[in-house]
Amino acid sequence: MGRDAVTGWVERYEEAWRAQDVDALDGLFAQDARYLRSPYDAEPLDGLDAIKGFWVDPTPFTMTATVVAADGPDAVVRVEVRYGGDEPQEYRDLWVLRFAPDGRAELFEEWAYWPEKRYTV
């Protein structure tokens, strides 16, 4: 997928997340997709149903995203999310993605950091 296609996927992801539209995930993730909430996730979410069960979060947020790389089926996206609500939180995140030929994600891997976690030792 090229940068424009990856950007479109990210925009649809954000729209679905903002609307809490779990059904929209059918067009974003392959049926057998794997979602890792961290690169060392010992219990990844395997399959679309598992992703749907985890994905809903009604906390208000803002999000910016920039495609860093897109090469064939693989892409990296830099994302910043700021949650509002009672306990504001900010994350800077890299998404490592692998896409199926139909444009849905087969792999979604997050490398998230927040202000208190500047680096790891």
Image (cartoon, rainbow, N blue to C red):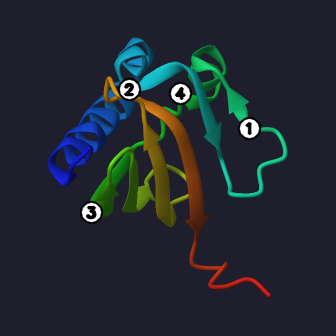
Q: Point out the tag, 4 or 3, that comes first from the N-terminus.
A: 4
- Residue beneath the point at 32% across and 23% down: 102
Q: Point out the tag, 1 or 3, that comes first from the N-terminus.
A: 1
Q: Point out the tag, 2 or 4, that comes first from the N-terminus.
A: 2
Alpha carbon of mark 4 to alpha carbon of mark 3: how far?
A: 23 Å
Is the residue under label 1 in contact with that under label 2 (CB below 8 Å)?
no
Q: Point out the tag, 2 or 1, that comes first from the N-terminus.
A: 2
Q: Is residue 104 above or below residue 70?
A: above
- Residue beneath the point at 26% across and 43% down: 1
> Which amino acid does the dot numbered 2 rest on?
Leu
Q: Which element is circle 3 on?
A: strand
Q: Position of residue 38 (x, y in %)?
A: 68, 55
> Which amino acid does the dot numbered 4 rest on?
Val
Q: Which element is circle 4 on?
A: loop
Is the residue under label 3 in contact with that under label 4 (CB below 8 Å)?
no
The residue to which callout 2 is attached is: 28
The residue to which callout 4 is attached is: 56
Q: Is residue 45 above or below residue 77?
A: above
Q: Position of residue 83 (x, y in %)?
A: 45, 54
Residue 44's disc number: 1
The one of 93 and 17 positioned closer to us in this rendering: 93
The residue to which callout 3 is attached is: 66
Is the residue under label 1 in contact with that under label 4 (CB below 8 Å)?
no
Alpha carbon of mark 2 to alpha carbon of mark 1: how far?
A: 17 Å
Kindly report which numbered mark, 2 or 4, lies closer to the viewer in this rendering: 2
